[in-house]
Image: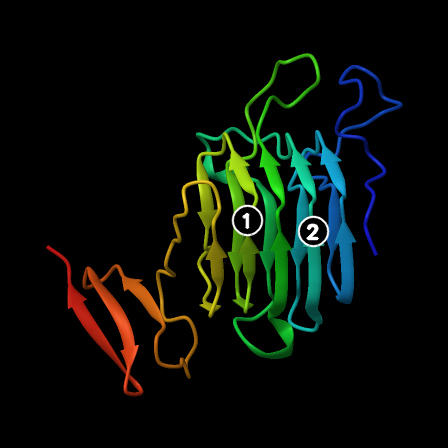
Amino acid sequence: MPYRQTAEPGGNYGSPLSPLNPAAPGIKLETAQFISFTNCYTDANAGNGVEIVGTSASQLNNLYFTGCIFNRDGAGDQATPLDAFAGVKVKGGAPTGSAGANLMKFSNCLVVTGKADDAGGGLAGPKYGVWFENTEYFQWAGGRTEGVTADYYVGAGGNYRPSIVDVQDGIFTLPLRVPVAAAGDGMAYFDQATNKLMIRSGSTWKGVTLT
């Protein structure tokens, strides 16, 4: 079920009656299956707009978001990675299997960056439009990510067969490591150690030297 923080990130900074949670998301899911969100709206969160983060024992699968707006989410400074937030953050507790984040789909959703408070002050956030890591069959179709530093961030983990279609600039960021141990043909990732594009073909990884 959606999570609502008790500390209001959009409250009065000088009032002890409305304390700020420095990482409060708009919606938080840790163990969830078969949930659909339609035309939902989050605004002025201190953390991620939607935070779907699993553990080694969690089940995260079949979550669908349609026509949602994640507005001015994340009060972190875009120039400081440690304070980086995303309009949508999806991270499984393990790269694959039941502890991964499986079958997540976002259709025609909007991420809008802005200032951390309604008065127009504070730092711009979020840093990323979409953050996905340790996912299987993650999909983002349509929609926009406006004003963010980077449309996508794939995290440090692997992603198995993600699909990014028609988002703003139409750019898809490849994983920076092998997506999964048993990857199927047609997959690709960028190997930073060898500066090669690795493509799965004939059940083996084949490198393409970039010049």
- Seen in the picture, residue 76 relative to 173 is either above or below; the reply is above
Q: Which residue sits furthest bottom? A: 203
Q: Residue at x 52, y 71 (%)?
A: 95
Query: Disc 2 versus disc 1: distance between alpha carbons?
Result: 10 Å
Q: Nearer the viewer, residue 172 or 83?
A: 172
Quadrant assignment, res 169 = top left
- Seen in the picture, residue 118 relative to 67 is either above or below; the reply is above
Q: Nearer the viewer, residue 28 or 165?
A: 165
Q: Residues within 10 Å of mark 1 (few under 14, many from 20)?
A: some
Q: Is residue 188 left or right of residue 54?
A: left
- The spot of residue 111 in percent (x, y) is 59, 38
Q: Which residue sits furthest left? A: 211
Q: Is residue 95 left or right of residue 180?
A: right
- The spot of residue 41 in percent (x, y) is 75, 38
Q: Is residue 19 left or right of residue 138?
A: right
* Numbered badge on residue 142: 1
Which amino acid type is marked by label 1? Gly
- Seen in the picture, residue 64 relative to 38 is either above or below; the reply is below
Which amino acid type is marked by label 2? Thr
- The spot of residue 39 in percent (x, y) is 76, 44
> Looking at the image, how many numbered discs can be counted on the residues?
2
Under circle 1, the secondary element is loop
Q: Residues within 10 Å of mark 2 (few under 14, many from 20)?
A: some
Q: Residue at x 63, y 73 (%)?
A: 99
Looking at the rendering, in which quadrant would you find the C terminus?
bottom left
Looking at the rendering, in which quadrant would you find the N terminus?
bottom right
Under circle 2, the secondary element is strand
Q: Residue at x 60, y 21 (%)?
A: 115
Q: Which residue is mark 2?
A: 66
Q: Residue at x 36, y 71 (%)?
A: 178
Q: Which residue sits furthest right? A: 17
- The spot of residue 82 in percent (x, y) is 50, 39
